[in-house]
Amino acid sequence: MKLELRGITKRFGDFTANDRIDLLVESGTVHALLGENGAGKSTLMNVLFGLYDADEGEVLLNDEPVVFAGPGDAMAAGIGMVHQHFMLVHPFTVAENVMLGHEDVTGPAKLLDLEAARAKVREISERFNFNVDPDAVIEDLPVGAQQRVEIIKALSRDASVLILDEPTAVLTPQETDELLGIVRDLRDAGTAVVLITHKLREVKAVADTITVIRRGKVVGTAEPTASQEELASLMVGRAVTMRVDKDEAKPGETMLSVDGLTVVDEAGIVQLDGVSFDVKAGEILAIAGVQGNGQTELTEALLGIVPSDAGSATLDGEVITGKAIKDILMSGLGFVPEDRTEDGIVAPMTIANNLILDIHDRKPYSRGGVLQPKVIAEEARKHVEQFDVRATSIEQTTGSLSGGNQQKVVLARELSRPLKLLIASNPTRGLDVGSIEFVHKRIVAERDGGAAVIIVSAELDEVVALADRIAVMYHGRIVGIVPPDTDRDTLGLMMAGAHDEEEAA
Amino acid sequence: MSDQTATATDEKRDGRGLLREIAESQTAVVVFAIIASMILGSLLIIAASEDVREAATYFFSRPSDTFSAMWHAVSSAYIAMFQGAIYNPNGGTFAAQIRPFMQTLTVATPLLFAGLGLGIGFRAGLFNIGAQGQIIMGATLGGYVGFAWDLPVGLHLLLAVLGCALGGAIWGFIPGILKATTGAHEVIVTIMLNYIALNLLSWLLTLEAFQRPGSDNPQSPQVADTAEYPLVLGDQFPLHLGFVLALLCAWGAWWLMERSTLGFQFRAVGANPSAARTAGMNVKRAIVLVMVIAGALAGLAGSAQVLGTEKSLTSGIAASFGFDAITVALLGRSRPLGIVLAAILFGGLRAAGPALQVQAQLPVDIVLVIQSLIVLFIAAPPLVRFLFRLPAPTHEKEVAA
């Protein structure tokens, strides 16, 4: 099996997403497609998968030109794709999703052969330790498990070329390592794997060949032996520092004090189990942990979105638990939500409006219940410039921005009021290297300005780079608070629930 | 590229997403939808015309007769509609010539009031189907003040109008508070409240307090002169003060949604309630307020009926204005200016009905079909774009590709 793309060009209006791209993928290799968000990686794969028609260029399969009219053709030719955004039917079970599109029937009544699908799911799940129950309903599964279902779907169709579009964006470090293991197994079994990513560590870990794309063009190929810095500078076109530049923290008074905070969800399950910790002014506490171990509940309980069932949180001497969200925000909490598009922005509203979402009823943005459009526009222009939001106008809808720029809008909003505490969940998820650097700098600046900062991140790199102290969560509890130079194996063990009560800092 | 595509595909394909799509459809699509409906309407007129059918019996000997009959049928129908709704050149006096347009504006008044309320709801993400019931309750309460109380000029009208707004507001508050506190879906609740309102009014009309003295008919006494909307352009036109009030409300609705902090919250809650909540907005309060405002505006539509044109309560007081107003709000893209234009268009179509029947001898139902076709086309923007070769908006292009 040999798949080749020759001179692929794809335009959207005046915008050239792919500019004469060549790519060669061979059986038994892992080909990494590396590039920033918006570089044109996904567009290229959508062309290959038959979702977009190329304006120029051709696709060759075993040296024969082929034209895929749609995903069906591509799949029949042995190309499987795991999309960045899952293509799953939420009310269906795992087995039903896996059989979707090639529903086998059994018996004289031609009933759906669910048993065969279940067996297939079980078989693949066991082979790769996916731990996926074929009868689980998709919407009840955590994001990480949903993605494993996507992978099962592709694998169940015996794909000989497997395209993984940003597969680790939602995975925990452990899951990522497991996935990289799967990628290696697949390669050894003769599958050609195309790994689309902007994460250098993964590329270096599994890729045999690396093609770097920038602004829709191939800017070079690299060997996996190239250093992260070399790859990064190739990707963004300038030298990038991989470490966050920050001085030693100068912690002041205790700003936030959490005491025995407990959250029980509607189903009666304890999601947050008596969590206690302090954060001082001028320090960053990073919360590490596999997704779904209570981090979300912790941040949401602090903001007041979910009610806490026991315990309390005190911000600068004032108890905030039980208060209205609005009052908590206005008492000096900045909140960067985990899911940007769901909780962070109102996509159809303008950038200017999104920048005042939480303060639209305050002076000077409004007076006596009347909005002040001039002030709003002026401030918006200022913030857009300060936070380097790439937009044509402040009247542009926020939904039309790229993910990185949307995140900058959220940050610009949250950091524009004086903060005592900043809570940021996965602040750089899905962002490109340049934006990550910018976001990190801003967070450190907030710390140096005297705010207490809580970072929740599934990316261990980010946790280690930003943290002054690391709190590790497991099953709704904090299993330990450790210094940032703790080695990764120890952190990994703690994230897996090994009790390490070594208190530090 | 990937991020932009993602946000477009991620938009939920539920009722909320549909509402937003309709609310943000291009003006060009709306205009061409109206044109397409009139073209399809022409085919119906041809099919319904006696003359065309007669000429078609000898089509093969003289086909030109059929075609001229078709042309005649269509042109006379649209001329009749124009003369019935806008301007009648055979009127003699100028007043008689523009009387049709004044009639159009009068019919448009309740549609405008109710459409404004629904539009605010739609932008706040609430699919309020209850304008019909809200009109009935508004007309009932305001009408009662109008015929049962004896008050001085000015004050009586004011209280009657406020009564109408209050009646509608109460009928909007119920689904609002139910949704905010229990999550009950507003579509179901408002539909059911329409039935309750209608039957409540029918029952009230059997009571002595609501019955016209010396009559057994389910009809209330006439509202007092002091509670009627005065005619604004003299006795020769039916246009009453309610229309002026409706225009003021249109401006008020624009101001509320675009200039007030409350409208800002309504828009944010409508587009993304969870982000609105995370930003500290009180989503439940917004839902209740939107429903109360929508109900009050629908109640004012009831005032246009009971204090303006009908002048007494019957069980048919709301006609089908509450449902037509949904169409008006969608056609007007939930924006006040759009709703003003859409209400006048629909007022015109309704006003044209009798002329169509008398002048062109066509069934009045054709007007309803044209109204319905307009909505159908608006709900399917890609169809209109295909028919008229309009460019797709950029974000849809990517999703469609």
Image (tube, coloured by chain):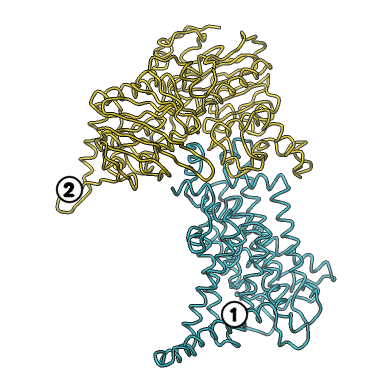
Q: Is residue A292 visible?
A: no
The residue most toward the left is: A108
Coordinates of residue A315 in the picture (x, y in percent):
65, 21
Disc number at residue B40? Answer: none
> For mark 1, what is the residue?
B78
Coordinates of residue A185 in the picture (x, y in percent):
26, 23
Disc number at residue A106? Answer: 2
Find the distance from the CA under tag 2 to the CA under tag 1: 61 Å
Q: Colour of chain B?
A: cyan
Residue type beneath disc 2: Thr
Please state which of residues B168 and A121 is positioned toward the viewer in this rendering. A121
Q: Residues within 10 Å of mark 2 (few under 14, many from 20)?
A: few
Q: Residues within 10 Å of mark 1 (few under 14, many from 20)?
A: some
Q: Residue at x 42, y 18 (%)?
A: A201
Coordinates of residue A241 in the picture (x, y in percent):
54, 15
Q: Is residue B264 visible?
A: yes
Considering the numbered disc 1 on the image, is that residue within a helix, a strand or a loop? helix
Mark 2 and mark 1 on one chain: no
Please state which of residues A308 and A55 is positioned toward the viewer in this rendering. A55
Q: Residue at x 61, y 50 (%)?
A: B124
Instruction: Determine the chain carrying the residue at label 1.
Output: B
Q: Nearer the viewer, mark 2 or mark 1?
A: 1
Q: Which chain is yellow?
A: A
Q: Residue at x 28, y 37 (%)?
A: A61
Q: Are marks 2 and 1 in contact (CB under 8 Å)?
A: no
Please state which of residues B362 and B255 is positioned toward the viewer in this rendering. B362
Q: Quadrant of the C terminus of chain A?
A: top right
Coordinates of residue A446 in the picture (x, y in percent):
65, 20
